[in-house]
Amino acid sequence: MINIKDRKAYIIGGGVAGVAAAAFLIKDAGMKGGNIIIIDRESVSGGGFDGQGSAEHGYLSRGYRMFEEIIYLSTYDLFSKIPSPDNPNKTLKDDFFAFNAGLKIIAKARLIKDGKILDSSRMELNWRDRINLVKLLYYPEKYFGTKKISDFFTAHFFKSNFWFMWATTYAFQPWHAVLEMKRYLCRFVHDAPRFNMSCVLSAPYCEHDFIILPLVKMLNKSGARFLNNAEVTDLDFALINGKKTVTDIIFRDAGRENIKVAHDDLVFVTNGSMMTDATVGSMDKPPTPATGNSTAWNLWKNISKKSDGFGNPEVFCSSTQKTGWESFTITFKDSAFFELVEKLSGNKAGTGGLITFKDSNWLMSITLPPQPYFKNQPAGTFVCWGYGLSPDKTGNFVNKKMSECGGKEIMEELFRHFGFSKDAPSIIKNALCIPCFMPYITAQFSPRNKSDRPAVVPPGTRNFAFIGQFVEIPNEIVFTVECSIRSAKTAVCRLLNLSEKIPPLYQKKYNIKSFFDGFRTILR
Protein backbone atom coordinates (compact mmCIF):
# COMPACT_ATOMS: atom_id res chain seq x y z
CA MET A 1 0.00 0.00 0.00
CA ILE A 2 1.37 3.42 -0.95
CA ASN A 3 2.18 6.19 1.51
CA ILE A 4 -0.79 8.32 2.61
CA LYS A 5 0.90 11.43 1.23
CA ASP A 6 0.84 9.93 -2.25
CA ARG A 7 -2.79 8.83 -2.16
CA LYS A 8 -5.73 10.88 -3.40
CA ALA A 9 -9.17 11.37 -1.90
CA TYR A 10 -12.36 12.21 -3.76
CA ILE A 11 -15.12 13.60 -1.56
CA ILE A 12 -18.53 13.67 -3.23
CA GLY A 13 -20.70 16.27 -1.53
CA GLY A 14 -19.49 19.61 -0.18
CA GLY A 15 -21.76 19.77 2.86
CA VAL A 16 -20.46 19.82 6.40
CA ALA A 17 -19.67 16.07 6.32
CA GLY A 18 -17.62 16.48 3.14
CA VAL A 19 -15.54 19.44 4.26
CA ALA A 20 -15.08 17.83 7.70
CA ALA A 21 -13.75 14.67 6.02
CA ALA A 22 -11.23 16.78 4.11
CA ALA A 23 -10.10 18.47 7.33
CA PHE A 24 -9.66 15.13 9.14
CA LEU A 25 -7.71 13.70 6.17
CA ILE A 26 -5.27 16.61 6.42
CA LYS A 27 -5.06 17.09 10.18
CA ASP A 28 -5.40 13.49 11.42
CA ALA A 29 -4.07 11.41 8.52
CA GLY A 30 -1.44 13.77 7.13
CA MET A 31 -2.77 13.71 3.56
CA LYS A 32 -1.58 16.50 1.29
CA GLY A 33 -4.34 19.02 0.65
CA GLY A 34 -3.50 19.08 -3.03
CA ASN A 35 -4.50 15.42 -3.27
CA ILE A 36 -8.03 16.08 -2.05
CA ILE A 37 -10.87 16.96 -4.45
CA ILE A 38 -14.28 17.97 -3.05
CA ILE A 39 -16.97 17.51 -5.69
CA ASP A 40 -20.25 19.36 -5.14
CA ARG A 41 -23.39 19.74 -7.23
CA GLU A 42 -23.93 23.13 -5.57
CA SER A 43 -22.08 26.34 -6.36
CA VAL A 44 -21.21 27.05 -2.71
CA SER A 45 -19.84 24.64 -0.11
CA GLY A 46 -21.56 24.03 3.20
CA GLY A 47 -24.75 22.21 2.24
CA GLY A 48 -27.37 22.90 4.89
CA PHE A 49 -24.94 25.19 6.71
CA ASP A 50 -25.87 28.06 4.45
CA GLY A 51 -26.19 31.75 5.13
CA GLN A 52 -26.50 34.53 2.63
CA GLY A 53 -28.05 37.88 1.89
CA SER A 54 -27.82 41.45 3.07
CA ALA A 55 -29.71 43.92 5.22
CA GLU A 56 -30.95 45.62 2.06
CA HIS A 57 -32.36 42.52 0.36
CA GLY A 58 -32.92 40.30 3.39
CA TYR A 59 -30.87 37.52 4.94
CA LEU A 60 -31.60 33.82 4.51
CA SER A 61 -30.55 30.85 6.61
CA ARG A 62 -32.49 27.71 5.74
CA GLY A 63 -31.81 26.07 9.11
CA TYR A 64 -30.85 26.93 12.67
CA ARG A 65 -28.64 24.66 14.78
CA MET A 66 -28.33 24.23 18.51
CA PHE A 67 -25.26 22.71 20.13
CA GLU A 68 -24.78 20.82 23.40
CA GLU A 69 -21.68 20.80 25.54
CA ILE A 70 -21.45 17.13 26.50
CA ILE A 71 -22.50 15.10 23.46
CA TYR A 72 -21.06 17.06 20.48
CA LEU A 73 -17.58 15.65 20.93
CA SER A 74 -16.77 15.02 17.24
CA THR A 75 -17.90 18.55 16.45
CA TYR A 76 -15.55 20.09 18.98
CA ASP A 77 -12.77 17.81 17.77
CA LEU A 78 -13.23 19.38 14.31
CA PHE A 79 -13.42 22.89 15.79
CA SER A 80 -10.07 22.29 17.51
CA LYS A 81 -8.45 21.77 14.10
CA ILE A 82 -9.74 25.01 12.50
CA PRO A 83 -7.77 28.22 13.14
CA SER A 84 -9.75 31.09 14.60
CA PRO A 85 -10.34 33.73 11.90
CA ASP A 86 -9.72 36.47 14.48
CA ASN A 87 -6.75 35.04 16.37
CA PRO A 88 -4.25 32.71 14.63
CA ASN A 89 -3.05 31.45 18.04
CA LYS A 90 -6.49 30.10 18.87
CA THR A 91 -8.98 27.71 17.31
CA LEU A 92 -12.65 27.76 16.47
CA LYS A 93 -13.21 25.64 19.57
CA ASP A 94 -11.65 28.38 21.70
CA ASP A 95 -13.90 30.98 20.09
CA PHE A 96 -17.00 28.81 20.55
CA PHE A 97 -16.57 28.17 24.25
CA ALA A 98 -15.37 31.70 24.99
CA PHE A 99 -18.57 33.02 23.42
CA ASN A 100 -20.78 30.60 25.35
CA ALA A 101 -19.02 31.36 28.64
CA GLY A 102 -20.76 34.71 28.54
CA LEU A 103 -24.12 33.41 27.31
CA LYS A 104 -26.69 31.67 29.48
CA ILE A 105 -29.72 30.20 27.69
CA ILE A 106 -32.86 29.61 29.77
CA ALA A 107 -36.17 29.64 27.90
CA LYS A 108 -38.60 31.68 29.99
CA ALA A 109 -41.27 31.54 27.28
CA ARG A 110 -40.88 28.09 25.77
CA LEU A 111 -44.62 27.78 25.04
CA ILE A 112 -47.05 30.60 24.24
CA LYS A 113 -50.82 30.47 23.70
CA ASP A 114 -53.11 33.41 22.99
CA GLY A 115 -50.15 35.74 23.44
CA LYS A 116 -49.48 34.51 27.00
CA ILE A 117 -46.67 32.38 28.41
CA LEU A 118 -47.75 28.88 29.46
CA ASP A 119 -46.35 26.93 32.40
CA SER A 120 -44.13 24.58 30.42
CA SER A 121 -42.74 22.90 33.53
CA ARG A 122 -45.84 20.68 33.54
CA MET A 123 -45.40 17.78 31.09
CA GLU A 124 -49.13 16.82 31.04
CA LEU A 125 -48.45 13.10 30.46
CA ASN A 126 -50.70 10.22 31.45
CA TRP A 127 -49.34 7.06 33.07
CA ARG A 128 -49.37 4.99 29.91
CA ASP A 129 -47.23 7.52 28.09
CA ARG A 130 -44.89 7.84 31.06
CA ILE A 131 -44.34 4.10 31.02
CA ASN A 132 -43.77 4.17 27.27
CA LEU A 133 -41.08 6.85 27.67
CA VAL A 134 -39.27 4.58 30.12
CA LYS A 135 -39.60 1.73 27.59
CA LEU A 136 -37.98 3.97 24.98
CA LEU A 137 -34.98 4.35 27.23
CA TYR A 138 -34.40 0.75 28.17
CA TYR A 139 -36.00 -1.61 25.65
CA PRO A 140 -33.63 -2.82 22.89
CA GLU A 141 -33.88 -1.21 19.47
CA LYS A 142 -35.16 -4.37 17.80
CA TYR A 143 -38.33 -4.08 19.91
CA PHE A 144 -39.39 -0.93 18.04
CA GLY A 145 -38.78 -2.13 14.48
CA THR A 146 -40.34 0.19 11.91
CA LYS A 147 -43.03 1.54 14.26
CA LYS A 148 -44.05 5.18 14.03
CA ILE A 149 -44.21 7.42 17.09
CA SER A 150 -48.01 7.47 16.69
CA ASP A 151 -48.04 3.65 16.97
CA PHE A 152 -46.42 3.83 20.38
CA PHE A 153 -48.14 6.66 22.28
CA THR A 154 -51.74 7.53 23.08
CA ALA A 155 -53.66 10.33 21.34
CA HIS A 156 -53.36 12.34 24.57
CA PHE A 157 -49.55 12.36 24.24
CA PHE A 158 -49.71 14.56 21.14
CA LYS A 159 -51.61 17.27 23.03
CA SER A 160 -49.18 17.41 25.95
CA ASN A 161 -46.62 20.08 26.74
CA PHE A 162 -43.97 17.36 26.54
CA TRP A 163 -44.80 16.63 22.90
CA PHE A 164 -44.98 20.27 21.81
CA MET A 165 -41.58 20.99 23.32
CA TRP A 166 -40.06 17.71 22.11
CA ALA A 167 -41.45 17.95 18.58
CA THR A 168 -40.40 21.55 18.00
CA THR A 169 -36.96 21.22 19.63
CA TYR A 170 -35.99 18.24 17.46
CA ALA A 171 -38.49 18.54 14.52
CA PHE A 172 -40.28 15.24 15.11
CA GLN A 173 -43.68 14.37 13.64
CA PRO A 174 -46.08 11.61 14.82
CA TRP A 175 -45.35 9.58 11.67
CA HIS A 176 -41.59 9.59 12.20
CA ALA A 177 -39.72 6.53 13.47
CA VAL A 178 -40.10 5.84 17.18
CA LEU A 179 -36.61 4.29 16.98
CA GLU A 180 -35.14 7.73 16.19
CA MET A 181 -37.06 9.21 19.14
CA LYS A 182 -35.61 6.48 21.36
CA ARG A 183 -32.07 7.40 20.31
CA TYR A 184 -32.71 11.08 21.04
CA LEU A 185 -34.12 10.28 24.47
CA CYS A 186 -31.09 8.13 25.29
CA ARG A 187 -28.69 10.87 24.20
CA PHE A 188 -30.46 13.73 25.99
CA VAL A 189 -31.81 12.08 29.15
CA HIS A 190 -29.25 13.96 31.27
CA ASP A 191 -30.95 17.19 30.17
CA ALA A 192 -34.46 16.03 31.10
CA PRO A 193 -34.78 18.18 34.26
CA ARG A 194 -34.02 21.25 32.17
CA PHE A 195 -36.69 21.24 29.49
CA ASN A 196 -36.03 24.98 29.31
CA MET A 197 -33.16 24.60 26.81
CA SER A 198 -30.53 25.48 29.42
CA CYS A 199 -28.36 22.68 28.00
CA VAL A 200 -28.12 24.49 24.66
CA LEU A 201 -25.02 26.26 23.36
CA SER A 202 -24.99 28.68 20.46
CA ALA A 203 -22.57 29.57 17.69
CA PRO A 204 -21.58 33.26 17.71
CA TYR A 205 -22.90 33.67 14.14
CA CYS A 206 -24.87 31.60 11.66
CA GLU A 207 -23.10 28.32 11.04
CA HIS A 208 -22.05 29.23 7.51
CA ASP A 209 -20.17 32.30 8.72
CA PHE A 210 -18.80 30.71 11.89
CA ILE A 211 -17.91 27.19 10.69
CA ILE A 212 -17.93 26.85 6.90
CA LEU A 213 -16.06 30.01 5.92
CA PRO A 214 -12.99 29.45 8.15
CA LEU A 215 -13.00 25.71 7.36
CA VAL A 216 -13.07 26.29 3.60
CA LYS A 217 -10.37 28.95 4.01
CA MET A 218 -8.18 26.40 5.81
CA LEU A 219 -8.79 23.79 3.11
CA ASN A 220 -8.02 26.25 0.32
CA LYS A 221 -4.80 27.23 2.08
CA SER A 222 -3.82 23.57 2.29
CA GLY A 223 -4.29 23.18 -1.47
CA ALA A 224 -7.51 21.15 -1.42
CA ARG A 225 -9.48 21.57 -4.64
CA PHE A 226 -13.19 22.31 -4.94
CA LEU A 227 -15.07 21.14 -8.02
CA ASN A 228 -18.44 22.91 -7.81
CA ASN A 229 -21.50 22.70 -10.06
CA ALA A 230 -20.53 19.10 -10.78
CA GLU A 231 -23.06 16.34 -10.17
CA VAL A 232 -21.92 12.74 -9.73
CA THR A 233 -24.55 10.19 -10.73
CA ASP A 234 -22.77 6.85 -10.42
CA LEU A 235 -19.67 4.97 -9.31
CA ASP A 236 -18.14 1.96 -11.03
CA PHE A 237 -16.78 -0.83 -8.85
CA ALA A 238 -14.43 -3.75 -9.43
CA LEU A 239 -13.68 -6.72 -7.21
CA ILE A 240 -10.05 -6.42 -6.10
CA ASN A 241 -8.64 -8.91 -3.63
CA GLY A 242 -12.20 -9.97 -2.88
CA LYS A 243 -13.41 -6.45 -1.98
CA LYS A 244 -15.55 -3.94 -3.87
CA THR A 245 -13.30 -1.10 -4.97
CA VAL A 246 -14.35 2.16 -6.63
CA THR A 247 -12.67 2.49 -10.03
CA ASP A 248 -14.54 5.35 -11.73
CA ILE A 249 -16.54 8.44 -10.75
CA ILE A 250 -19.28 9.16 -13.30
CA PHE A 251 -20.60 12.68 -13.84
CA ARG A 252 -24.09 13.65 -15.00
CA ASP A 253 -22.72 16.16 -17.49
CA ALA A 254 -21.67 14.22 -20.59
CA GLY A 255 -19.21 17.00 -21.41
CA ARG A 256 -17.33 16.52 -18.14
CA GLU A 257 -14.57 13.89 -18.11
CA ASN A 258 -15.16 11.05 -15.66
CA ILE A 259 -12.50 10.38 -13.02
CA LYS A 260 -10.43 7.19 -12.93
CA VAL A 261 -9.82 6.17 -9.32
CA ALA A 262 -6.62 4.33 -8.40
CA HIS A 263 -7.08 1.28 -6.19
CA ASP A 264 -5.35 2.91 -3.22
CA ASP A 265 -7.21 6.20 -3.51
CA LEU A 266 -10.23 6.95 -1.31
CA VAL A 267 -13.81 7.87 -2.16
CA PHE A 268 -16.25 9.45 0.33
CA VAL A 269 -19.91 9.78 -0.65
CA THR A 270 -22.54 11.94 1.00
CA ASN A 271 -25.57 9.78 0.28
CA GLY A 272 -28.90 11.61 0.23
CA SER A 273 -29.58 15.21 1.11
CA MET A 274 -31.83 16.99 3.58
CA MET A 275 -31.56 20.34 1.84
CA THR A 276 -31.84 19.42 -1.80
CA ASP A 277 -34.53 21.11 -3.91
CA ALA A 278 -35.21 23.72 -1.23
CA THR A 279 -37.15 26.62 -2.76
CA VAL A 280 -37.17 30.23 -1.62
CA GLY A 281 -39.99 32.76 -1.68
CA SER A 282 -40.15 36.48 -0.97
CA MET A 283 -42.29 38.96 0.95
CA ASP A 284 -45.03 38.62 -1.67
CA LYS A 285 -44.48 35.12 -3.09
CA PRO A 286 -44.44 31.69 -1.44
CA PRO A 287 -41.69 29.17 -2.19
CA THR A 288 -42.27 27.09 -5.31
CA PRO A 289 -43.99 23.78 -4.45
CA ALA A 290 -41.69 20.75 -4.30
CA THR A 291 -41.74 18.36 -7.26
CA GLY A 292 -40.40 15.38 -5.33
CA ASN A 293 -38.15 14.49 -8.28
CA SER A 294 -34.76 15.53 -6.97
CA THR A 295 -31.72 14.32 -8.92
CA ALA A 296 -29.63 14.60 -5.74
CA TRP A 297 -30.72 11.10 -4.75
CA ASN A 298 -29.72 9.50 -8.07
CA LEU A 299 -26.15 8.69 -7.02
CA TRP A 300 -27.29 6.74 -3.97
CA LYS A 301 -30.10 5.09 -5.97
CA ASN A 302 -27.66 3.93 -8.64
CA ILE A 303 -24.95 2.56 -6.37
CA SER A 304 -27.47 0.97 -3.98
CA LYS A 305 -28.33 -1.46 -6.79
CA LYS A 306 -24.75 -2.73 -6.72
CA SER A 307 -24.73 -4.12 -3.20
CA ASP A 308 -27.20 -5.03 -0.47
CA GLY A 309 -24.90 -3.21 1.96
CA PHE A 310 -25.37 0.16 0.28
CA GLY A 311 -28.80 0.91 1.80
CA ASN A 312 -32.23 1.73 0.42
CA PRO A 313 -32.69 5.42 -0.53
CA GLU A 314 -36.33 4.96 -1.57
CA VAL A 315 -37.32 4.70 2.09
CA PHE A 316 -36.18 8.28 2.64
CA CYS A 317 -36.94 10.17 -0.58
CA SER A 318 -40.35 8.90 -1.70
CA SER A 319 -42.77 11.01 0.35
CA THR A 320 -42.05 14.73 0.52
CA GLN A 321 -45.48 15.26 2.12
CA LYS A 322 -44.06 13.58 5.23
CA THR A 323 -40.50 14.88 5.15
CA GLY A 324 -40.87 18.59 4.37
CA TRP A 325 -41.41 21.75 6.37
CA GLU A 326 -40.90 25.47 5.95
CA SER A 327 -38.54 27.91 7.61
CA PHE A 328 -38.36 31.69 7.41
CA THR A 329 -35.68 34.30 8.10
CA ILE A 330 -36.75 37.85 9.01
CA THR A 331 -34.50 40.89 8.68
CA PHE A 332 -35.61 43.93 10.68
CA LYS A 333 -34.37 47.44 9.97
CA ASP A 334 -34.87 48.47 13.61
CA SER A 335 -35.15 46.93 17.09
CA ALA A 336 -38.91 47.28 17.61
CA PHE A 337 -39.82 43.60 17.16
CA PHE A 338 -36.92 42.35 19.27
CA GLU A 339 -37.89 44.76 22.05
CA LEU A 340 -41.49 43.48 22.05
CA VAL A 341 -40.42 39.83 22.18
CA GLU A 342 -37.82 40.49 24.86
CA LYS A 343 -40.40 42.29 27.01
CA LEU A 344 -42.98 39.50 26.62
CA SER A 345 -40.57 36.59 27.08
CA GLY A 346 -38.18 38.00 29.65
CA ASN A 347 -35.28 36.82 27.49
CA LYS A 348 -32.73 38.99 25.73
CA ALA A 349 -31.87 37.92 22.18
CA GLY A 350 -29.70 34.81 22.23
CA THR A 351 -30.80 33.68 25.70
CA GLY A 352 -34.28 32.24 25.05
CA GLY A 353 -33.88 29.25 22.76
CA LEU A 354 -37.14 28.47 20.95
CA ILE A 355 -40.55 30.02 21.45
CA THR A 356 -43.36 27.73 20.25
CA PHE A 357 -46.97 28.77 19.72
CA LYS A 358 -48.86 25.82 21.12
CA ASP A 359 -52.13 26.72 19.39
CA SER A 360 -50.53 27.37 16.00
CA ASN A 361 -52.04 25.34 13.17
CA TRP A 362 -48.69 25.64 11.43
CA LEU A 363 -46.93 24.50 14.65
CA MET A 364 -44.79 27.60 14.34
CA SER A 365 -41.72 28.35 16.45
CA ILE A 366 -39.29 31.25 16.42
CA THR A 367 -35.89 32.06 17.90
CA LEU A 368 -34.04 35.32 18.42
CA PRO A 369 -30.35 34.37 18.03
CA PRO A 370 -27.46 36.47 19.32
CA GLN A 371 -26.95 39.60 17.26
CA PRO A 372 -25.44 40.20 14.80
CA TYR A 373 -26.39 36.82 13.35
CA PHE A 374 -24.41 37.36 10.14
CA LYS A 375 -20.86 38.68 10.14
CA ASN A 376 -21.65 41.36 7.56
CA GLN A 377 -24.85 42.43 9.33
CA PRO A 378 -24.89 46.20 9.92
CA ALA A 379 -25.36 47.62 13.39
CA GLY A 380 -28.99 48.55 14.06
CA THR A 381 -30.39 45.61 12.07
CA PHE A 382 -31.76 42.42 13.59
CA VAL A 383 -32.29 38.91 12.20
CA CYS A 384 -34.47 36.12 13.59
CA TRP A 385 -35.33 32.64 12.36
CA GLY A 386 -38.44 30.51 12.62
CA TYR A 387 -40.18 27.50 11.14
CA GLY A 388 -43.49 25.71 10.80
CA LEU A 389 -43.71 21.94 11.15
CA SER A 390 -47.16 21.84 9.50
CA PRO A 391 -46.96 24.09 6.43
CA ASP A 392 -49.82 22.20 4.77
CA LYS A 393 -52.33 23.49 7.35
CA THR A 394 -54.39 26.69 7.11
CA GLY A 395 -53.26 29.42 9.49
CA ASN A 396 -55.16 30.49 12.58
CA PHE A 397 -55.38 34.09 11.35
CA VAL A 398 -54.25 34.00 7.70
CA ASN A 399 -56.72 31.92 5.72
CA LYS A 400 -54.02 30.11 3.74
CA LYS A 401 -51.69 27.20 4.10
CA MET A 402 -48.25 28.31 5.23
CA SER A 403 -46.83 26.85 2.01
CA GLU A 404 -49.05 29.27 0.05
CA CYS A 405 -47.95 32.37 1.96
CA GLY A 406 -45.36 34.99 1.19
CA GLY A 407 -43.20 36.46 3.92
CA LYS A 408 -45.61 39.31 4.70
CA GLU A 409 -48.45 36.88 5.45
CA ILE A 410 -46.17 34.69 7.59
CA MET A 411 -45.25 37.77 9.62
CA GLU A 412 -48.92 38.71 10.02
CA GLU A 413 -49.67 35.24 11.42
CA LEU A 414 -46.62 35.45 13.70
CA PHE A 415 -47.57 38.87 15.09
CA ARG A 416 -51.13 37.73 15.83
CA HIS A 417 -49.84 34.73 17.80
CA PHE A 418 -47.62 37.06 19.83
CA GLY A 419 -50.46 39.52 20.37
CA PHE A 420 -48.57 42.28 18.57
CA SER A 421 -51.35 43.22 16.13
CA LYS A 422 -51.23 46.93 16.99
CA ASP A 423 -47.51 47.14 16.20
CA ALA A 424 -47.56 44.85 13.16
CA PRO A 425 -48.11 47.35 10.28
CA SER A 426 -45.20 49.65 11.14
CA ILE A 427 -42.77 46.81 11.92
CA ILE A 428 -43.65 44.69 8.87
CA LYS A 429 -43.21 47.76 6.69
CA ASN A 430 -39.55 47.90 7.74
CA ALA A 431 -38.82 44.19 7.56
CA LEU A 432 -38.06 41.48 5.01
CA CYS A 433 -39.22 37.90 5.58
CA ILE A 434 -37.87 35.19 3.27
CA PRO A 435 -39.64 31.81 3.48
CA CYS A 436 -37.97 28.58 2.42
CA PHE A 437 -39.58 25.17 1.84
CA MET A 438 -37.35 22.11 2.28
CA PRO A 439 -39.03 18.94 0.95
CA TYR A 440 -36.53 16.44 2.45
CA ILE A 441 -35.54 18.17 5.68
CA THR A 442 -36.68 15.34 8.00
CA ALA A 443 -36.23 12.44 5.57
CA GLN A 444 -33.70 10.84 7.91
CA PHE A 445 -36.46 10.33 10.53
CA SER A 446 -38.47 8.04 8.20
CA PRO A 447 -39.41 4.63 9.67
CA ARG A 448 -36.83 2.15 8.40
CA ASN A 449 -35.17 -1.19 8.72
CA LYS A 450 -31.62 -1.26 10.03
CA SER A 451 -30.24 -2.14 6.58
CA ASP A 452 -31.90 0.88 4.91
CA ARG A 453 -29.05 3.10 6.09
CA PRO A 454 -25.60 1.80 5.08
CA ALA A 455 -22.65 1.53 7.44
CA VAL A 456 -20.04 4.28 7.15
CA VAL A 457 -17.64 1.72 5.68
CA PRO A 458 -19.84 -1.04 4.22
CA PRO A 459 -18.63 -4.61 4.75
CA GLY A 460 -16.69 -6.00 1.79
CA THR A 461 -15.50 -2.62 0.50
CA ARG A 462 -11.92 -1.44 0.14
CA ASN A 463 -11.59 2.29 -0.59
CA PHE A 464 -15.07 3.62 -0.07
CA ALA A 465 -17.18 5.21 2.71
CA PHE A 466 -20.57 6.85 3.17
CA ILE A 467 -20.85 10.07 5.19
CA GLY A 468 -23.62 12.44 6.21
CA GLN A 469 -27.09 12.07 7.70
CA PHE A 470 -28.12 8.81 6.03
CA VAL A 471 -25.53 6.43 7.44
CA GLU A 472 -25.98 3.93 10.26
CA ILE A 473 -23.83 4.69 13.29
CA PRO A 474 -24.99 2.59 16.25
CA ASN A 475 -26.82 4.72 18.86
CA GLU A 476 -26.08 7.96 17.00
CA ILE A 477 -28.85 10.51 16.44
CA VAL A 478 -29.44 11.99 12.99
CA PHE A 479 -30.41 15.59 12.14
CA THR A 480 -27.43 16.99 14.04
CA VAL A 481 -24.12 18.49 13.00
CA GLU A 482 -22.57 15.90 15.30
CA CYS A 483 -23.85 13.04 13.16
CA SER A 484 -22.38 14.47 9.96
CA ILE A 485 -19.02 15.21 11.54
CA ARG A 486 -18.86 11.88 13.40
CA SER A 487 -19.49 10.05 10.13
CA ALA A 488 -16.60 11.92 8.51
CA LYS A 489 -14.27 11.21 11.44
CA THR A 490 -15.28 7.55 11.46
CA ALA A 491 -14.79 7.20 7.70
CA VAL A 492 -11.27 8.66 7.76
CA CYS A 493 -10.15 6.64 10.79
CA ARG A 494 -11.51 3.32 9.51
CA LEU A 495 -10.45 3.59 5.88
CA LEU A 496 -6.91 4.49 6.93
CA ASN A 497 -6.74 2.35 10.09
CA LEU A 498 -5.71 5.38 12.11
CA SER A 499 -4.87 5.14 15.79
CA GLU A 500 -6.63 8.49 16.20
CA LYS A 501 -9.49 7.90 18.62
CA ILE A 502 -13.07 8.46 17.47
CA PRO A 503 -14.78 10.47 20.24
CA PRO A 504 -17.12 8.24 22.29
CA LEU A 505 -20.90 8.46 22.08
CA TYR A 506 -22.12 10.09 25.26
CA GLN A 507 -25.08 8.44 27.01
CA LYS A 508 -26.22 8.63 30.64
CA LYS A 509 -29.35 6.50 30.58
CA TYR A 510 -27.73 4.06 33.02
CA ASN A 511 -26.67 6.83 35.40
CA ILE A 512 -28.91 6.58 38.49
CA LYS A 513 -29.13 10.34 38.99
CA SER A 514 -30.03 10.94 35.33
CA PHE A 515 -32.71 8.24 35.49
CA PHE A 516 -34.39 9.70 38.57
CA ASP A 517 -34.10 13.27 37.30
CA GLY A 518 -35.69 12.20 34.02
CA PHE A 519 -38.43 10.26 35.81
CA ARG A 520 -39.25 13.25 38.01
CA THR A 521 -39.54 15.34 34.86
CA ILE A 522 -42.14 13.10 33.20
CA LEU A 523 -44.13 13.04 36.45
CA ARG A 524 -44.53 16.81 36.41
Image (cartoon, rainbow, N blue to C red):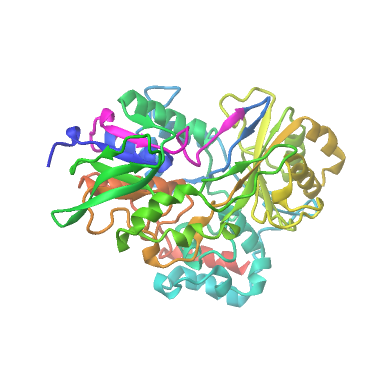
Residue 39 belongs to magenta span: yes
Residue 190: in sight, yes or no?
no
Residue shown at 56% from the left, 43% from the top: 63
Q: Is residue 451 left or right of residue 462?
A: right
Q: Is residue 510 left or right of residue 167?
A: left
Magenta stretch, main secondary structure class: loop
Q: Please name whichever residue, 181 or 162, is drawn nearer the observer in this view of the structure.
A: 181
Magenta stretch: includes residue 342: no
Residue positioned most to the right: 422
Residues rendered magenta in the picture: 27-53
Q: Is residue 434 left or right of residue 37?
A: right
- Quarter of the rendering containing residue 282: top right
Q: Quadrant of the N terminus?
A: top left
**Point 69% across, 50% down: residue:** 403
Q: Among all residues in the image, which is located at the extreme bottom?
A: 128
- In-front residue for pair 175/336: 175
Q: Does the rendering let one see residue 461?
A: yes
Residue 511 is situated, as x and y percent measured from the top left of the image, at 41, 63
Residue at position x 55%, y 74% from top?
152
Front one among 464 and 328: 464
Circle count: 0
